Image (tube, rainbow, N blue to C red):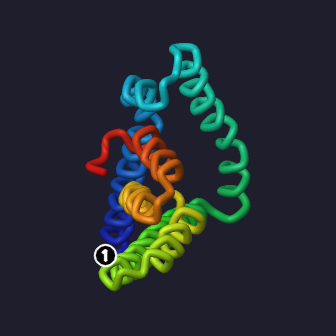
Amino acid sequence: DDVQVSSRAECVNVALLVLCQSAQSLVYGGIALFLPLIREDLSLTFTQAGTLAAASSLVYAFMQIPSGFMADRFGPRRLFAVGVLGTNALAYIDICRGRLAQKELWVANYYWNQGNLIGVRQRLEVILKDYPRTLVVPETLFLLADVHARQGLADEATKTLRRLAEEYPYTEW
């Protein structure tokens, strides 16, 4: 019976190892797969794109040394668990920041419906200052340009729309 439990544990370990190695390979190889799109989106030259791919490989190689040291010191299971929990925690924090930004946008829309353009502008500026890497930024820029236009700030409206077009050309906004 102990042989079956040990055999099952080994199978689970091998399956997890294959799954994790596959995911890691996909992430590691993702730069090469998506390099043409990355190059186009960031307007990189071939030299810059090659440097990006090489830097990715070098960082991966250099991180093997501290990873091995930590696995020797703390054990591979603990290191794996911390990695999974840390990654999930960072993802959850990013989701929460996105929801906070959405809340600010909802409040701005409430102020818009009330005709309070100063309140709208303040909320939109909070989004741009505190949540600059969230998905609501394109909509925020569009609404901010509209607020500027309605307040007679044509130069600010043009500047904001130009930023929207340059930074988010593929969005509906």
List the single residue furthest toward the top: 46
Q: Is residue 48 visible to us here? A: yes
Q: How many marks?
A: 1
Please tell me whether mark 1 sits on a helix, a strand or a loop.
loop
Q: Is residue 39 left or right of residue 70?
A: left
List the single residue furthest toward the left: 172
Neighbor class of circle 1 (other Cα within 10 Å; few <14, some 14-19, many 20+) is: few
Residue drawn at point x = 35 percent, y = 51 percent:
19
Using the image, determine if residue 112 lies above or below residue 7: below
Q: Is residue 69 left or right of residue 87?
A: right
Q: Nearer the viewer, residue 109 or 98?
A: 109
Q: How far across and down, in percent of the image, does residue 52 sit? A: 57, 27
Q: How far across and down, in percent of the image, does residue 127 sit? A: 51, 68
Residue drawn at point x = 51 percent, y = 46 percent:
159
Q: Is residue 136 visible to us here? A: no
Q: Is residue 15 left or right of residue 101?
A: left
Q: How far across and down, in percent of the image, does residue 115 sit? A: 36, 81
Using the image, determine if residue 99 lies above or below residue 145: below
Q: How far across and down, in percent of the image, does residue 17 sit? A: 42, 52
Q: Nearer the viewer, residue 84 or 8?
A: 84
Q: Nearer the viewer, residue 57 or 34?
A: 34
Using the image, determine if residue 52 lies above or below residue 68: above
Residue drawn at point x = 73 percent, y = 52 percent:
69
Q: Which residue is mark 1?
A: 1
Q: For residue 70, which quarter of the picture?
A: bottom right
Q: Amino acid at mark 1?
A: Asp
Using the image, determine if residue 118 lies above or below residue 88: below
Q: For residue 8, which quarter of the picture?
A: bottom left
Quarter of the N terminus within the rendering: bottom left
Residue drawn at point x = 54 percent, y = 26 percent:
53
Q: Nearer the viewer, residue 18 or 26?
A: 26
